[in-house]
Image (cartoon, rainbow, N blue to C red):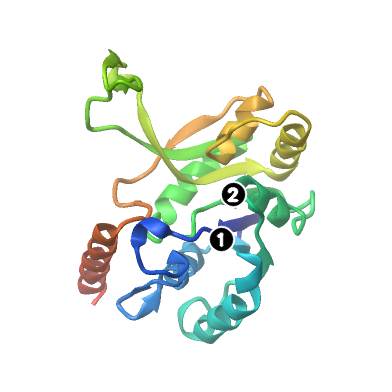
Amino acid sequence: MENLVAIIPAAGAGKRLGLGINKAFAKINSVPLLVHCLTMLSATGMITRAIVVLAADEVEEGYELLKSYQAEHFATLPFVVVAGGKERQDSVVNALEAITETEGYVAVHDGARPFAGKEVFVRTLQAAKKYGAAIAAVPVKDTIKVVNEEGEVTATPARSSLYAVQTPQIFEVNLLKAAYANLAQNPAQVTDDASVVELLGHKVVVAQGRYENIKITTPEDLLFAENLLAQQEKRDG
């Protein structure tokens, strides 16, 4: 097994899903979304342990919930639950504190992306081993417009150079720790972990993701996930 620790940020409220609960606990085919994610991670056979990040007031309940599903869904995957912070970047920092510098590589993977699959993890880890930092991404299919506050189109970037970024995002542990230490000293707005590493001046490369690797965000995404799971079960059956 690779020396690869997974950080699973899942502390967000998920308001766009409209369920009134943390979307990590939303159920797809009677199983919580977060459990589906951990099941997928376990099935890769690549993760040494998972660090799940939940809101501080959900840590105890979340741990007990995951423990109740572990034997049936991800029996071979050790996990811990830690408290998140105010922002996503704070949550990742909290999780990094539970990882030693000798653990090799860390994969940050959204708790709302249960369909990444082993091949995406393999490709991303291979790239990270070569360059120190790699992210899963897919070419955009639509034309992208840059629009100003008045709704006017100001630019049309070449589609061939645009990628939609996903997770996993995999880094050498020491590199990601150094990047977040730099961010603490030089605060900036970031939307993913790769951005934090980029601010350090380190190259980040893209590994091929998959279009099915969506982030469950809206009610329509839940329906898509249910259909995709049904297709997988039909193939496996």
Q: Residue 65: give x, y in percent of width and height.
A: 54, 81
Q: Quadrant of residue 152?
A: top left
**SS for tag 2?**
helix
Which residue is at the front of the view, 155 or 204?
155
Q: Residue 104: give x, y in percent of width and height.
A: 71, 49
How packed mark 2 is, by other alpha carbons closer than 10 Å (few <14, some 14-19, many 20 or more), is some
Q: Residue at x 47, y 61 (%)?
A: 44
Mark identifier at residue 123: none
The C terminus appears in which quarter of the rendering? bottom left
Marks 2 and 1 sit apart, C-alpha to C-alpha, by 8 Å
Tell me: 139 left or right of 230: right
Tell me: 16 left or right of 56: left
* N-terminal-most mark, 2 or 1: 1
Compared to residue 131, the image places residue 146 above or below, namely above
Q: Give yes or no for contact between labels 2 and 1 (Cβ–Cβ under 8 Å).
A: yes
How packed mark 1 is, by other alpha carbons closer than 10 Å (few <14, some 14-19, many 20 or more), is many
The N terminus appears in which quarter of the rendering? bottom right
Which residue is at the front of the view, 107 or 153?
153
Please, what is the three-letter code of the amino acid marked with disc 1? Ala
Which residue is at the front of the view, 185 or 121?
185
Tell me: 210 left or right of 189: left
Q: Residue 128: give x, y in percent of width and height.
A: 58, 38
Compared to residue 98, the image places residue 73 above or below, namely below
Is residue 3 in view? no
Q: Quadrant of residue 200?
A: top right
Residue under circle 2? 88
Mark identifier at residue 11: 1
Is residue 97 in view? yes
Q: Residue 73: give x, y in percent of width and height.
A: 46, 79
Q: Residue at x 77, y 54 (%)?
A: 97
